[in-house]
Amino acid sequence: MNQEAKDYKPEDWQRHYEENDIRWDLGQVAPPFVKLWEDGKLPLGKVLIPGCGRGHEAVFLAEKEFDVTAVDFADGAVSYLKNILQERNLAARVLRRDFFSLDDSHNEVYDLMIEQTFFCAISPRQRQDYVAKVARILKPGGMLAGLFYHTGEEGGPPYNTTREDIETHFSKSFQILELDKTLLSAEKRKDKEWLGILKKI
């Protein structure tokens, strides 16, 4: 579909799950996040994962005893993740909700947010709102660990994200601790992912 992501409604994403057309899904936690955890760079505590999809990162972090909240507005994503968590006897909160509609009860609650194929899925018009929302839900000094998709292509979703895009949108509210192309991407995303570690100012 060539329509803007802002007009890409829950039922449009749901159709992808019904037709098993989830090409963005790696079928596993993204390797760079595993490495961040192994290196002790992810603060243990409350973590939010917006646009979680089938929730591979949510499952991984729940297994590592993070307090996980995963958010998606497609029934197919939410039901799949809830079933996996139940099968594995893991505790995590899964919300069927639009990330942008999270209310004030989420303000300054989270130590960490994981960004994975969500920033590239929303309309570029929403990116500043995204940054404001992330800044609102993270605790002071909280961290955003993100994989930002550099498609190098016009249109979307997924929408192209450059280093300049990240610096322009985040620099007012976040200290950019790390921002480099990762060498650990899954094969189909080689040389296309910026790994960013950003700290709320």
Image (cartoon, rainbow, N blue to C red):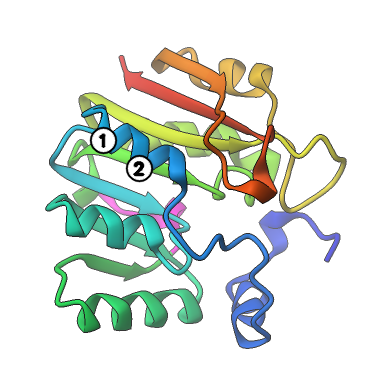
Identify the residue at image location x=58%, y=73%: 10
Q: Residue at x 23, y 41 (%)?
A: 107
Residue 131 falls left or right of residue 70: right
The residue that disc 2 covers is 34
Q: Quadrant of the C terminus?
A: top left
Badge 1 crowding class, 10 Å Cα cut-off, few under 14, some 14 to 19, many 20 or more, is: few
Q: Residue at x 17, y 51 (%)?
A: 64
Of 81 and 48, nearer the camera is: 81
Horizontal relation, residue 46 to residue 59: left or right: left
Please provide percent x and percent y for residue 176.
Answer: 43, 14
How far from the left and from the top, in percent, is residue 71? 37, 61
Magenta stretch bounds: 98-104
Left or right of residue 96, residue 62 in this image: left
What x and y, as percent, mark residue 131? Answer: 47, 32
Residue 3 highlighted magenta (yes or no):
no
Residue 23 in the image, given as x and y percentages of width and height = 68, 65
Instruction: Say whether marks 1 and 2 touch (CB < 8 Å).
Output: yes
Which residue type does callout 1 highlight? Glu
**Location of residue 197 with respect to 160 vertically, above or below:** above
The crowding category of the residue bearing disc 2, from other C-alpha atoms within 10 Å (few below 14, some 14 to 19, many at least 20), is some
Secondary structure at badge 2 equals helix
On residue 195, which mark appears? none
Q: Amino acid at mark 2?
A: Val
Which residue is situated farthest in the bottom direction here?
A: 18
Please, what secondary structure does the residue beneath circle 1 have?
A: helix
To which quarter of the image does residue 183 belong?
A: top right
Looking at the image, residue 195 sits to the left or right of residue 105; the answer is right
| Image mark for residue 38 | 1
